[in-house]
Amino acid sequence: MSRRLKVAIVGLGIGGQHAEAYAKLPDLFEIAAVCDLDDARLEEAARRFGAPHRLKDYAELLRLDGLDIVDICTPPHAHFGLIASALAAGKHVVCEKPLVGSLADVDRLAVLERESSGRIMPIFQYRFGNGLQRLKYLSDRGLVGTPYLTTIETAWFRGADYYATQWRGKWATEMGGVCLTQAIHSHDMLSYINGPIRRLFARVATRVNKIEVEDCAAVSVEMENGSLATLSATLGSATQISRLRFAFSDVTAESNLDPYRPSRDPWTFVSIWPDKQALIDVALKDFKPQREFFEGQFERMHEALTKGGDLPVTLADARASLELITAIYHSARTGEAVDFPIGPDHPLYRGWLPADHCKA
């Protein structure tokens, strides 16, 4: 029987969804502690998930005996310090998006991870929808052909009530808008399937809400594999959808339109070539669906931590995502295309916040 890993969840907003996923994997995980500054939320989570420890002090949490994983779901501006402290305590870390606020911080975490017995797993749960996994299955078996064009749409709605939460919509605390907070998952799936980006040009705007950060974006991308991609995102769509469409020489794969579950089934896989369609149909019959979203990512994480092997999402994956964000903001502000990779010599390597919103 697999060893149950003890998890502490820090931040019980989105952390509540993480707790629900762990609770559905009782043979793999025990929710040993919950941590939040809100007393009512803390007590409710501890009661609901049977956590024996409920704490408001993060340092006290890190001193708990037998804790394996610290799962961080706080507002983004606090992530780096919380991750660093957990690694120093020898804990594994799960952390919500965006992982940190700069490429410099990602690279610093890579150093800290190497020096620690703990490992870091960023959250990109959309990767584990079985629709997207079918495409990954076909791609890994060389059945999709030459990549042509990917189009990704994130058309959601967020109004004043959403931004009534104090930290949202502000550079200093949310650290970005629709590109960073809402569309980041769909944009991650671009590189998950098609690999690294070569070049990018972007435009962003704030047109829907009276906030500091962007709520509309249009991005043109050239991939290293030679294909092109377009990314569009808005928080002003009355009809909410997410749509991913991958056009290859041998198949076109298209997602469902569920705004928050576009990577799950059903997906369509259509080839103009009857012989290719036959190969694809036969291959997909052998595909074995697995657990999806948070449960799917956590189950795969458990296997990596207890049996060895790569985590299902790595720091390198988070870096690629934040490299995309950095390039979007730089291109939008300068009107210039951005070449990849982005290193320490780039003007936004140490952070993309506008100068008047940076910490002193």
Image: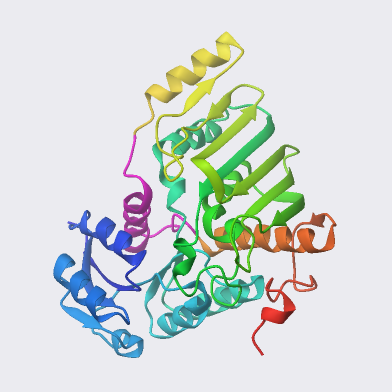
Quarter of the image with the C terminus is: bottom right
Tell whether position 293 is magenta.
yes
Q: Is residue 298 placed above or below 149 in the rendered structure?
A: below
> In terms of secondary structure, what is the magenta stretch mainly?
helix
Taking the spot 51% from the left edge, 42% from the top edge, the residue there is: 238
**Residue 283 versus residue 40 in the image, above or below:** above
Residue 180 locus on image (x, y percent): 58, 60
Number of numbered callouts drawn: 0
Residue shown at the point (35%, 45%) measured from the top left: 292
Percent x, y for residue 174? 54, 70
Percent from the top left, x then y, of residue 59? 35, 89
Left or right of 93? Residue 222 is right
Q: Nearer the viewer, residue 74 or 341?
A: 74
- The region drawn magenta spans 289-313
Q: Is residue 210 inside the magenta stretch?
A: no
Q: Is residue 96 above or below residue 59?
A: above
In front here: 360 or 106?
A: 360
Q: Is residue 145 left or right of residue 260?
A: right
